[in-house]
Each structure stands twice: as structure tokens, then as C-alpha cells.
Image (cartoon, rainbow, N blue to C red):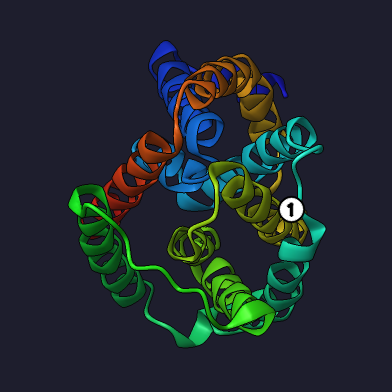
Amino acid sequence: MSAALGALTLKLLGVLWLGAFLGALAIGGAGFAFALVASSIWLHALPPLQTAVLVLASGVCLHLFSIWLMRRTLEPGRLWPFLIGGAVGIPIGISLLALSDPGVLKHGLGFFLLAYGLFALFAPRLPHVPHGGRLADGIVGFLGGILGGLGGFSGVLPTIWAQLRGWSKETIRGVCQPFIFLAQLTSLALLGGIAVDSASVLMFALTIPALATGSWVGWLIYGRLDERRFRQALAALLALSGLVLVL
């Protein structure tokens, strides 16, 4: 631990805090995009595997806290098809890691998110999908699980689908955040044994104040958003996430 402490610099600490604060702000305000926001900053100073561990550990804690805050508005009837689909899809995505090209996946998903995010941001009204029921929800959860296993992108498809369903902001968060929590917890369990070291533990501990502050500010922002502005915030984050993946 002392060697890990000696490797820390003020610049590295600033990068850690900035990524943690902005990522937590995204979760507090919109309920997703921590991985994309934080990793886009942390990867400038940390190796990919260490970044992945920090993203997963931070995301699990933040989503668990948010789920507890939303516990009275959770709707298990809407949630369980996504969780079942995700539980099947996540191991498949992880098993496909060795067979897929991460660059092609990132760029393809990035262009899709950028196009959809800009459309959702500027369209006067989004298309509404009233059909499909729980089977369609489960399929979206399954596909989201595969993307989560492949690259940690578990939340994007359920978020888009929930928007097209026309659900309220509480319902969208009540479905997407437990789903992302499941995906990140599963991935952390698989990665933790090979990637967690004393330096990662120390860095995670040092990011806790920034995580808490960003989450608190994000929740304050979320409380002031009506349905229209929440939809716009989601669209902007989706477009930003796509831009980060493309660049």
C-alpha cells in the first residue's frame, strides 16, 4: 500500500477526482453513463484494466445508493424481464469478448448513440412503442446484457427502449439503474480476482469524496428536472456517450 501511495501525484489525484465527480454527476442526474464519462477521463492516466476495475467498483456503489433512494418508486413488474434477459445475456457477451473486435463495436455503437441522441434531443416528439410487452422488455435486457459483457455498455439499450416506451423519469431510472447494477456487479465479480490490487483499492478510497459530491449534486439537478428536461438530459448524455466512443 505504501508503494501505491508513493506512485500517486497531484495530477493523478486530480484526474481521479474529475472522472469520479463527472461520472457520479451523470448517475445522480440521469441514472447512467458513469462508465463512459469516467473512463474517458481516467484512461488518460490509468491503464485500461485498472480503469475498468475502478469504473465497476464505483458504479456498483453509486447505483446501489441510487436504488436505495428510489426504493419506494421501483416497479418490480417492469423490472424483472430486463433482469432475467440481462442475466442470460451478460455471460454470452463476456464469452464473445475473444471473438469480437472492440474497435468495431465501439465505433458502431458510438455512431448509433450519437445519431439517436441528436435525434431525441431535437425531435419535438419521440416515437412511441406501446406493443411487445414483457417479452420485448426481456429481449432488450438480453441485448443490453450482451453489450454489457462485451464492453460495459449495458445501460444504453434499456435507456433508449424505456424512452420509446414513454415511461416517466422515475420508471426509467427504476428499470435502468438496477439493470446496470446487475451487469456491473457481475463484471466486477469476474474481473476482481485478477485485477484488484492495493493501488486500485487506494485509488477507489480516494475517489469516494468526489463520488459522493458528484452524486449529491446530480440528485439536486434531477429533482429540478421535469419530464421534458429529463428526456433532453438523457438524449444529451446518449449523444455525448456516442461522441466519446467515436473519438
73 is higher (above) or lower (below) than 140: above
Kindly identify the amino acid type of the residue bearing the numbered disc 1.
Gly
Residue 200 sits above or below residue 35 on the image: above
Q: Quadrant of residue 107?
A: bottom left
Dividing the picture into quadrants, the one containing residue 92 is bottom right
Residue at image mark 1: 192
Residue 243, horizontal then vertical, whole percent: 23, 52
Q: In this view of the protein, which residue sits in the foreground, 149 or 132? A: 132
Residue 121, relative to residue 219: is it above or below?
Answer: below
- The x and y percentages for residue 69 are 75, 30
Residue 156 rendering spot, x and y as whole percentages = 46, 60
Residue 61: name its quadrant. Answer: top right
- Left/right placement of residue 55 relative to residue 99 reads right
* Residue drawn at x 48%, y 23% as measured from the top left: 21
Q: Position of residue 127 (x, y in %)?
A: 33, 68
Left or right placement of residue 219 versus residue 91 in this view: left
Q: Secondary structure at mark 1?
A: helix
Quadrant (top left, top right, bottom left, bottom right) of the N terminus: top right
Is 89 in front, or is 225?
A: 225
Residue farthest bottom in this picture:
99
Residue ID at (43%, 11%): 10
Q: Is residue 46 left or right of residue 182?
A: left
Query: How many numbered marks does the figure carry?
Result: 1
Q: Is residue 48 left or right of residue 81?
A: left
Q: Circle 1: is it few (<14), some (14-19), or many (20+) Cα within 10 Å? A: some
Residue at left 53%, top 17%?
220
* Quarter that holds the C terminus: bottom left
